[in-house]
Image: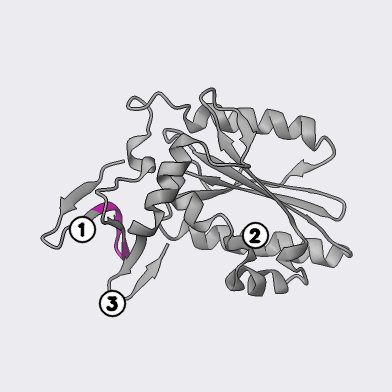
Amino acid sequence: MKYLHVKQEDGYTVTLVASIPTEDILVRSKVDYVPQYVTDVFGKTKRVTKDITFVKLLNLLRKEFPKHQLISMGTPVNFDVAPTHLSRVEMHFKEESQVRACLKEIAVSDLLIRSRVQPAWTWESPMQHGLSVVLHVAWYDTVYFLQFKDIFLGDLHCRYSAKFGFDPKDAKITHFRYNDTGDLEEFKTLNKFEKHADSIKDKVEFLRIFRDGSVENT
């Protein structure tokens, strides 16, 4: 991924990581931060890239959820990027109508994501069996993950989940990190790299700048 990294007179650095006709994706920081999804890429990193981690995930899901059916691969994948973390959301519904509504909203959300630029995360391997739906989110930057890993419990997702009659607080959410071999290990305490990311996370902003000048965290 090509990017532009500029140091400003106010001491901040700005990294332009993506640009489309409707918006720019920027990372602004006080600590000269460049996100991992533009540095940890095939040919430039020793970390395991998506082509391997995705296959490992699918093999793991076949073992852990043998009765579940994959709905899709998820958001279109850039196989050259090395993911840092993965979040699993397990939802158990009371009625089939909730399952149908949930899968419909996932499809709608996926279409919205495809129409925008979102390099920091992707939907991953949604699955369904009976009244259970399992979702995954792959994360491509540790600072971003630490900022947003609990977003599923926020107001926006509560309103989103209300469309299919589900309270996110009833979901089982498990976070994982990708290790040096591209395998998953449960995220319980911060490792050395995550401790550093945690110490600077309040000094890094992930921004979406629209052509009309409006800004949102992304």
- Which amino acid does the dot numbered 1 rest on? Tyr
Answer whether labels 3 and 2 touch (C-beta < 8 Å). Answer: no
Which residue is nearer to you in this view: 216 or 193? 193
The answer to which quarter of the image holds residue 53 is: top right
Q: Which residue is mark 2?
A: 106
- Residue 78 is at least partly visible in this image: no
Q: Position of residue 134 (x, y in %)?
A: 73, 49
Q: Magenta region: which residues?
A: 15-24
* 134 left or right of 84 in image: right
Distance from the alpha carbon under mark 3 to that under mark 2: 28 Å
The answer to which quarter of the image holds residue 163 is: bottom right
Q: Quadrant of the C terminus?
A: bottom left
Answer whether labels 2 and 1 touch (C-beta < 8 Å). Answer: no
Q: Position of residue 25 (x, y in %)?
A: 33, 58
Q: Position of residue 60 (x, y in %)?
A: 71, 30
Residue visible at 57% across and 57% down in the picture: 110
- Which amino acid does the dot numbered 2 rest on? Ile
Which residue is nearer to you in this view: 26 or 28? 28
- Which amino acid does the dot numbered 3 rest on? Asp
Question: Mark 1: few, some, or many residues within 10 Å (few <14, many ≥20)?
Answer: some
Q: Which residue is mark 1?
A: 12
- Residue 203 is at least partly visible in this image: yes
Which residue is nearer to you in this view: 101 or 146? 146
Q: Which residue is mark 3?
A: 212
Q: Quadrant of the N terminus?
A: top left
Q: Position of residue 170 (x, y in %)?
A: 78, 62
Mark 3 vs 2, N-terminal side = 2
